[in-house]
Image (cartoon, grey):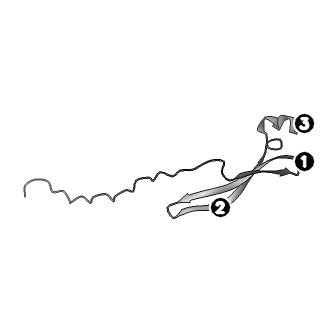
Amino acid sequence: MTGEEHPPTATPAARSLPLPVLLTPGTDWRAEWCAACKAWSRLTGSILLLTPDGVATVGAWAWCEFCDDPADEEGRARG
């Protein structure tokens, strides 16, 4: 052979396309009593993990609209 020889190229592995997953926000939250501010202002819900094997519940989240308000950080620091 007179020209440059190139090794055969391997074809790349087939990539799987992303699957559309319908997530409906707001289906697993509830209002609860916040013991810190003594009001029904605490929201809780589940944290879900989406994997190729399916969906799993990995934890819970909680947030109080009064205790966890980032706009009120200055007021809380003053006491």
Q: Mark 3 points at which residue?
A: 78
- Figure check: 72 above or below 24: above
Q: In which quarter of the image is residue 68?
A: top right
Distance of mark 1 from mark 2, alpha carbons?
Answer: 28 Å
Mark 2 surroundings within 10 Å by alpha-carbon count, few (fewer than 14), some (14 through 19), many (20 or more): few
Count of numbered circles in the view: 3
Name the residue located 53 percent from the left edge and 60 percent from the top edge: 51
User: Nearer the N terminus, badge 3 or badge 2?
Assistant: 2
What x and y, as percent, mark residue 20?
47, 51
Q: Name the residue under label 1.
A: 38
Q: Which of 22 and 55 is in front in this view?
A: 22
Q: Is mark 3 on a helix, strand or loop?
A: helix
Q: Nearer the viewer, residue 5 or 50?
A: 50
Q: Nearer the viewer, residue 35 or 6?
A: 35
Query: What's the amino acid at mark 3?
Result: Arg
Query: What's the amino acid at mark 2?
Result: Val
Mark 3 against mark 1, which lies toward the viewer? 1
User: Nearer the N terminus, badge 3 or badge 1?
Assistant: 1
Q: Are the two marked residues, 1 and 2, in contact with CB atoms closer than 8 angstroms?
A: no
- Figure check: 9 above or below 63: below
Q: Are the two marked residues, 3 and 2, in contact with CB atoms closer than 8 angstroms?
A: no
Q: Name the residue under label 2.
A: 58
